[in-house]
């Protein structure tokens, strides 16, 4: 996206996280004039760190921190949020909702400093729960977010923040864009500690079973719930395409390759070359019964569609997690919550 970033200063909020780290890496490859990366975690805990990027540890729920982060930047990507997998979301509804402070203060700062473009990462959790009760779900269209009945806590915050972006554009002229992410996965991200998403969690569990010799796996729910999963490189390209576009309404950004959780385990078992005994934890958080992305709008408006098949993306993710876990086992390290990868080009 040289037209958007060339000669401009770019801010990535949540840049120490999984998606943020990949976005910063891609912006560097494009030759963005200046990149500022902000996260609440200490820099030593970021997933990717680059020496030629301005790296700041700031709590963006605070208004003063948002103004410090945004000042001097032309393009803002807001990926910052207190969130994780379904277990974390269901157990931390208030914390998830407090992320509304991040987007609110960033929007105020972006208006104050005349930001050229502002991107907000929303979520498929905004969609009406009544449309996601059947595993054989009809793919969700953008209009299906209303009447509103989103995921409690996290989903309500995302839906409200979408409206904030819309009204800052309509009332103040701030050029906002926002996309509803559908289950992003890939290497260089969280795979343990309670915030990991299903693909990384299943890869970890299969690897644990294989390394330990205990050929069994625990699955949350009955395994029949359905989802779609988007590989990280597709997410990064789609995010930048949307920010540069003239699409003013919320838009889906996700794969439409529907799979059951049992099917996801099948794939990872095939990659690992093992077959595991399955135990189902029926009282565990499992989210909605079915969710898939309707990509009609993004295909029509931008010509975007996922380029990485789930099986191929899972293989890349599995082998990265295996490398991390094998190294950890070899050095007898205590399991940390975060994994830092420092990359130089």
Image (tube, rainbow, N blue to C red):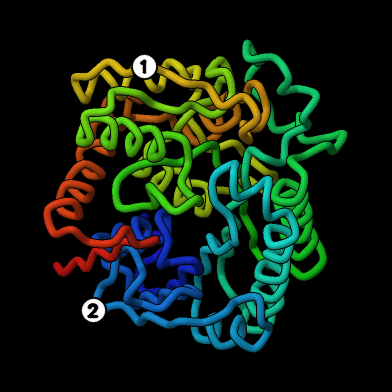
As drawn, is 291 to the left or to the right of 154?
left
Quadrant of the rendered image containing residue 289: top right
Query: Residue 277 shows which numbered tag?
Result: 1
Instruction: Determine crowd level at label 2: few under 14, some 14-19, many 20+ residues with C-alpha closer than 10 A.
Output: few
Q: Earlier in the sequence, mark 2 or mark 1?
A: 2
The quadrant where residue 218 appears? top left
Residue count near mark 1 (Cα–Cα under 10 Å), binned few <14, some 14–19, many ≥20: few
Image side of residue 270 versus residue 3, left or right: left
Between residues 332 and 1, which one lies in front from this camera angle? 332
Q: How many marks?
A: 2
Is residue 17 or residue 266 the one in the foreground?
A: 266
Residue 314 image-quadrant placement = top left
Left or right? Give the position of 262 relative to 116.
left
Say which residue label 2 marks: 51
Residue at the (34%, 42%) spot, across then down = 186
Q: Residue at x 20, y 55 (%)?
A: 328
Rendered-image quadrant of the C terminus = bottom left
Vertical side of 218 occupied by 18: above or below: below
Q: Quadrant of the N terminus?
A: bottom left
Q: From what the image shows, is residue 337 above or below residue 51?
A: above
Question: Where residue 46 appears, x then y in whole percent?
Answer: 36, 68
Q: Can the viewer see residue 257 in this picture? A: no
The residue lying toward the viewer, choosing from 181 and 277, is 277
Q: Nearer the viewer, residue 23 or 249?
A: 23
Q: CA distance from mark 2 to mark 1?
A: 45 Å
Where residue 14 appears, as percent x and y from the top left, is 49, 66
Q: Is residue 139 left or right of residue 13?
A: right
């Amino acid at each position: 996206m040289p037209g958007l970033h060339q000669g401009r200063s770019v801010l990535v909020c949540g840049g120490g996280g999984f998606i943020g780290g990949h976005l910063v890496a891609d912006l560097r490859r494009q030759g963005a004039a200046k990149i500022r990366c902000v996260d609440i975690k200490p820099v030593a805990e970021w997933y990717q760190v680059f020496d030629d990027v301005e790296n700041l540890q700031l709590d963006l729920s605070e208004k003063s921190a948002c103004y410090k982060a945004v000042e001097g930047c032309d393009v803002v990507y807001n990926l910052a949020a207190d969130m994780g997998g379904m277990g974390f979301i269901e157990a931390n509804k208030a914390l998830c909702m407090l992320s509304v402070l991040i987007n609110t203060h960033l929007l105020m700062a972006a208006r104050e400093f005349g930001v050229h473009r502002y991107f907000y990462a929303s979520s498929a959790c905004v969609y009406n729960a009544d449309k996601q009760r059947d595993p054989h779900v009809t793919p969700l269209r953008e209009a299906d977010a209303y009447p509103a009945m989103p995921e409690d806590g996290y989903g309500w915050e995302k839906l409200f923040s979408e409206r904030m972006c819309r009204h800052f554009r309509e009332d103040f002229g701030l050029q906002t864009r926002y996309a509803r992410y559908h289950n992003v996965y890939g290497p260089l991200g969280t795979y343990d500690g309670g915030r990991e998403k299903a693909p990384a969690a299943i890869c970890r569990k299969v690897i644990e079973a294989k390394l330990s010799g205990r050929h069994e796996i625990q699955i949350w729910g009955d395994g029949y719930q359905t989802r779609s999963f988007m590989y990280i490189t597709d997410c990064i390209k789609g995010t930048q395409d949307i920010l540069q576009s003239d699409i003013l309404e919320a838009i889906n950004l996700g794969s439409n390759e529907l799979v059951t959780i049992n099917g996801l385990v099948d794939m990872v078992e095939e990659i690992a070359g093992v077959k595991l005994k399955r135990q189902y934890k029926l009282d565990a958080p499992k989210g909605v019964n079915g969710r898939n992305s309707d990509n009609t709008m993004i295909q029509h408006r931008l010509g975007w569609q996922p380029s990485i098949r789930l099986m191929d993306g899972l293989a890349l993710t599995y082998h990265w997690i295996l490398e991390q876990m094998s190294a950890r086992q070899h050095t007898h390290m205590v399991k940390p919550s975060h994994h830092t990868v420092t990359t130089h080009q």
